[in-house]
Amino acid sequence: MSIPEIKRVLLKLSGEVLMGDQQFGIDPAFVADLAGEVKAAKETGLEICLVIGGGNIFRGMAGAAQGMDRAQADYMGMLATVMNALAMQNALEQLGVQTRVQSAIEMDKVCEPVIRRRAERHLEKGRVVIFAAGVGAPYFTTDSGAALRAAEMKCDALLKGTSVDGVYDSDPKHNPQATRFDTVTYDRVLADNLRVMDASAVALCRDNKIPIVVFSIREKGNLARVLSGEGVQTIVQDQ
Ligand code: UDP
């Protein structure tokens, strides 16, 4: 099954895809490759919003597990997403792709605040808009930030680029018999806790009828293949 006709997408990348083969942080060569994928997708005429996680640097839950105050740790996680957004902005602009970063936590020395109408204008002008700092509040994740921005910016689909090539009925890393869905409903994802994205993010997409396309961003050229309907992916949508 191919993905529906799309003109504007929100691409969500987990922070961990920025670390390449490292255990932590940002691998600039890998970020440059990712930027190349985004550029190729943009050259097909798509308008692209980007949300990048922060898990390659800091996750609030991990800090809380080690005794930190959860909200404090979450704010650190949000700051990590701003660093990743700036790294991606740098890589895209080195390839000649115009970008703007808009952060849900205002940081006027390094980026714009989130202003929807301004983001619209950037997209009209062919710029990639990178939304940083998730929803700007603790106890959320960048998946929720991605769903929120996808709804706000009226994106036709939320593309979730991860290390696996779709949604499975059980964890393929632990169960060799796990099978991948071509399509699956939002309700099944939520009822079976299929761990595509946070439940709040999935529910927001369901309520706003935004298809979620889960695919592997680790394979070169895969973003373009998925967008042309030739890739391997799982589409989460209503039946
Ligand atoms: N975070 C948050 N609110 C948000 C977005 C992110 O508190 O709206 C924090 C949270 O601590 C999270 C961290 O930022 O663990 C990094 O984001 P996320 O875990 O979503 O990154 P990813 O797993 O996609 O790399």
Image (cartoon, rainbow, N blue to C red):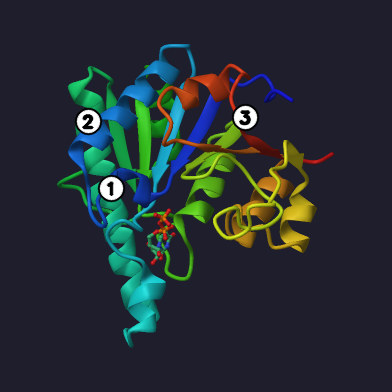
In the foreground, 174 or 103: 174
Amino acid type, callout 2: Ala
- Position of the C terminus by quadrant: top right
Q: Does the residue labelled 3 lie within 8 Å of ligand 1?
A: no
- Which residue bears the numbered disc 3? 156
Q: Position of residue 194 (x, y in %)?
A: 67, 57
Amino acid type, callout 1: Met
| Side of 33 relative to 2 (left or right) | left
The quarter of the rendering in which ligand 1 is drawn is bottom left
| Side of 23 relative to 4 (left or right) | left
For marks 1 and 3, the one nearer the N-term is 1
Q: Is residue 4 visible?
A: yes
Which mark is drawn over residue 91? 2
Is label 3 or label 2 in front?
Answer: 2
Q: How many marks?
A: 3
Amino acid type, callout 3: Asp
Which residue is pictured at 63% across the width and 19% down the height? 229
Q: How crowded is mark 2: few (under 14 residues within 10 Å), some or many (20 or more)?
A: many
